[in-house]
């Protein structure tokens, strides 16, 4: 039982940065914008969160700074693609490269600085429950936030007027514009939200997952988050399940290796999350659920308001 | 616009390189341009960081006589060839490519630029203008294996591997042989992270090892994340490539430090005085290429003394990490008593000694 608890705890920490980041990107894409700069924004958040937490001694301020840093970087993306109508794919890729360089520069004097891990927020009574206590209620703030945020986004997109307007911008920006909605303004807000979430995902890495700053520490998690949004077919609840599935597969294969469970080449096991993504894409695209792939119709298309 | 400008500059650089290449010894005032290609970020505090320390040592040693540049985070694919070619065509006369996966790219570019001198780390393809150099890291593994064998209480040691290439396999085997020599009950479990650098995944692998009962973590990946996990759980670990005690002041027992500076200085000197020749070298503890970091606070004096003894014996040549008799875990004899494995056998190693799991 202890081993199971230990595994589940690591799965949660592997899934959380993916979930935070992908939730933000999902909102951005539902608004019709494709921001491939996720990795760069995560790194900006990771370095800003770490530097702030170390210099002020307050992890809470670090988290705020991380969200702001991610949002600030996404504002650059927003200005270029939404106001100046630059190509979204090229700008997003540039943002990733920019973020890697910028974060390395800002963090260079903080490499190797020790910090304390983000404190656990124990909930009274609940945390003391056997087995599930530590798993469900003995986590740090960002873990709770990631789940709450994802559920909130699900509710917002499905149940609120604001969510419907946001989706309208992603499905048919001309129509949304004709109805009088400020498409560009709404997309700016979505992009900022996505940036802030990516920043939080980065902060989870540098403050909780591996509490330290080293260059390029996201190691491709931004790209996995992007794949996850597609994997989830742009639906928040599926995203929640997907993030935990991705985290779970990664951790379980490490444990299986350590326990000498299967004698399968390690490379094959490492491929599993990606194979799963491709498989799901194929099944969705070819199966009877074809209609449910529901990629936003205006995804990645620039919008120039005509008055 | 920028692109065209760049291309023009590059073409100009190529012409200058062609002109310079032949007349190096005469025009000594012109600084020698040296390029370095790294697989990771220089801030990884591991493999690439140590190569960059070597580059800085070269700059310090030769001052105005050299001009170095580096490209970091170069992936081991088509990108590598592009980066190396760009360095070669922009006037760099000596280029160090510092990862095994750059081998084919380096060889191809070396063919096209016969006047540029190339040095490839850890590979085996050579040419008149392409030398290879490598560290006998397994010698360091033999020393830390001795420490681990003495220090483990659970007799389970968690080893995080990157990829099962000979260099990593040698490390695992040298470590296990040394550990079991002082403690026959040791079991070394290997988890392959399938990456050289992913702090999160390296930490997860360390956690998996610890959750399965390991009390010492050894890594052949580049970030200090695993050490940090050991520190947090109050266990023990070894640093990789550089002294990582900053990240784990209590947990780090010691670290195998890659010290490339002496080699880089020697080779730059050779180019400057015109004596550079292609070769294949494999440098170890004796050459100062592989070094053992200061012992951590958990290492008791008698274990430290024993580790020093092992190190001295390897330097003196009285002990080889792969002294026979060695049988692999399937029972096949690999080296009879009285003989150690040859370098050739080492570079082809694809089997494990008893005690290795995974």
Image (cartoon, coloured by chain):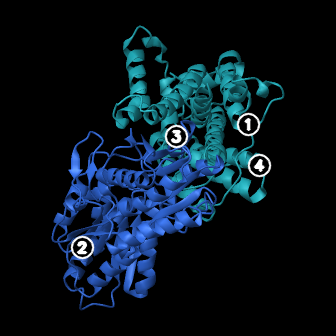
Instruction: Quadrant for residue B109, please give it.
Output: bottom left
- Disc 1 versus disc 2: distance between alpha carbons? 54 Å
- Disc 1 versus disc 3: distance between alpha carbons? 26 Å
SS label for mark 4? helix
Number of residue marks: 4
B254 is higher (above) or lower (below) than A242 = below
Quick check: can you spot residue B224?
Answer: no
SS label for mark 2? strand
The answer to whether tags 2 and 3 share a subunit is yes
- Disc 4 versus disc 3: distance between alpha carbons? 33 Å
Q: Position of residue A208 (x, y in %)?
A: 66, 44
- Disc 2 versus disc 3: distance between alpha carbons? 44 Å
Q: Are marks 4 and 1 in contact (CB under 8 Å)?
A: no
Chain letter, blue = B
The tag on residue B117 is 2
State the residue at coordinates (36%, 46%).
B163
Instruction: Quadrant for residue B289, please give it.
Output: bottom left
Q: Position of residue B78 (x, y in %)?
A: 29, 51
The tag on residue A141 is 1
SS label for mark 1? helix
Among numbered discs 2 and 3, the one appearing first in the sequence = 2
Chain letter for mark 2, please: B
Crowd class of label 4 (few under 14; some 14 to 19; many from 20; radius 10 Å): some
Residue closer to the observer: B283 or B1:
B283
Q: With A55 as the anchor, is B304 left or right in this view?
A: left
Q: Nearer the viewer, mark 2 or mark 3?
A: 3
State the residue at coordinates (30%, 41%).
B329
Q: Nearer the viewer, mark 4 or mark 3?
A: 3
- From the image, tell me which residue sits under label 4: A61
């Amino acid at each position: 039982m202890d081993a199971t608890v230990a595994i589940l705890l690591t799965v949660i920490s592997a899934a959380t940065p993916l979930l935070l980041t992908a939730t933000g990107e999902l909102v951005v894409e539902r608004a019709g914008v494709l921001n491939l700069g996720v990795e760069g924004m995560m790194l900006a958040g990771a370095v800003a969160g770490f530097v702030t937490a170390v210099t002020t001694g307050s992890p809470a301020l670090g988290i705020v700074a991380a969200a702001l840093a991610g949002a600030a970087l996404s504002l650059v993306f927003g200005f270029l693609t939404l106001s100046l109508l630059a190509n979204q794919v090229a700008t997003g890729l540039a943002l990733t490269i920019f973020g890697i360089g910028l974060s390395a520069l800002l963090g260079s004097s903080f490499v190797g600085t020790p910090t304390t891990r983000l404190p656990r927020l124990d909930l009274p009574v609940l945390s003391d429950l056997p087995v599930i206590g530590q798993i469900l209620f003995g986590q740090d703030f960002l873990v709770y936030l990631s789940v709450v945020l994802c559920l909130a986004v699900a509710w917002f997109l499905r149940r609120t007027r604001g969510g419907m307007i946001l989706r309208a911008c992603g499905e048919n920006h001309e129509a949304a514009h004709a109805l009088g909605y400020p498409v560009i303004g709404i997309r700016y807000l979505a992009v900022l939200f996505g940036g802030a979430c990516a920043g939080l995902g980065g902060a989870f890495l540098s403050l909780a997952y591996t509490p330290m700053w080293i260059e390029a520490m996201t190691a491709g998690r931004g790209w996995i988050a992007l794949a996850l949004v597609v994997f989830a077919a742009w639906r928040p609840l599926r995203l929640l399940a997907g993030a935990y599935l991705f985290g779970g597969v990664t951790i379980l294969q490490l444990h299986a290796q350590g326990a000498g469970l299967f004698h399968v080449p390690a490379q094959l096991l490492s491929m599993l999350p990606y194979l799963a993504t491709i498989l799901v894409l194929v099944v969705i695209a070819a199966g009877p659920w074809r209609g449910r792939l529901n990629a936003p119709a205006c995804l990645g298309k620039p919008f120039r308001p005509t008055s | 616009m920028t692109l065209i400008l760049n291309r023009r500059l590059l073409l100009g650089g190529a012409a200058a390189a062609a002109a310079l290449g032949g007349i190096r010894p005469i025009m000594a005032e012109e600084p020698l341009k040296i390029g370095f290609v790294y697989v990771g970020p220089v801030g990884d505090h591991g493999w690439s960081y140590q190569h960059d320390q070597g580059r800085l040592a070269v700059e310090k040693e030769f001052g105005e006589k050299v001009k170095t540049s580096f490209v970091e985070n170069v992936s081991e694919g088509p990108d590598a060839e592009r980066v190396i070619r760009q360095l070669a065509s922009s006037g760099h006369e000596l280029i160090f490519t510092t990862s095994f996966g750059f081998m084919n790219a380096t060889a191809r570019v070396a063919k096209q630029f016969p006047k540029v001198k190339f040095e490839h780390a850890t590979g085996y393809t050579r040419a008149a203008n392409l030398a290879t150099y490598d560290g006998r890291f397994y010698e360091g593994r033999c020393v830390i294996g001795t420490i681990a064998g003495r220090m483990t209480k659970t007799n389970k040691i968690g080893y995080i591997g990157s990829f099962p290439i000979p260099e990593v396999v040698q490390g695992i085997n040298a470590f296990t042989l040394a550990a079991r020599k002082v403690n026959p009950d040791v079991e070394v479990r290997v988890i392959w992270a399938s990456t050289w650098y992913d702090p999160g995944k390296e930490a997860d692998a360390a956690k998996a090892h610890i959750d399965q009962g390991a009390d010492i973590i050894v890594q052949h990946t580049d970030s200090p994340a695993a050490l940090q996990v050991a520190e947090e759980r109050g266990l023990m670990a070894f640093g990789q490539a550089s002294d990582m005690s900053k990240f784990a002041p209590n947990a780090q027992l010691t670290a195998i430090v890659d010290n490339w500076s002496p080699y880089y200085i020697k080779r730059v000197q050779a180019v400057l005085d015109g004596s550079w020749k292609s070769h294949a070298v494999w440098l170890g503890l004796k050459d100062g290429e592989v070094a053992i970091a200061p012992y951590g606070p958990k290492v008791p004096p008698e274990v430290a003394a024993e580790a020093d003894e092992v190190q001295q014996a390897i330097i003196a040549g009285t002990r080889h990490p792969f002294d026979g008799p060695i049988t692999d875990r399937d029972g096949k004899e690999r080296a009879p008593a009285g003989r150690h494995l040859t370098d050739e056998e080492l570079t082809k190693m694809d089997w494990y000694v008893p005690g290795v799991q995974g």
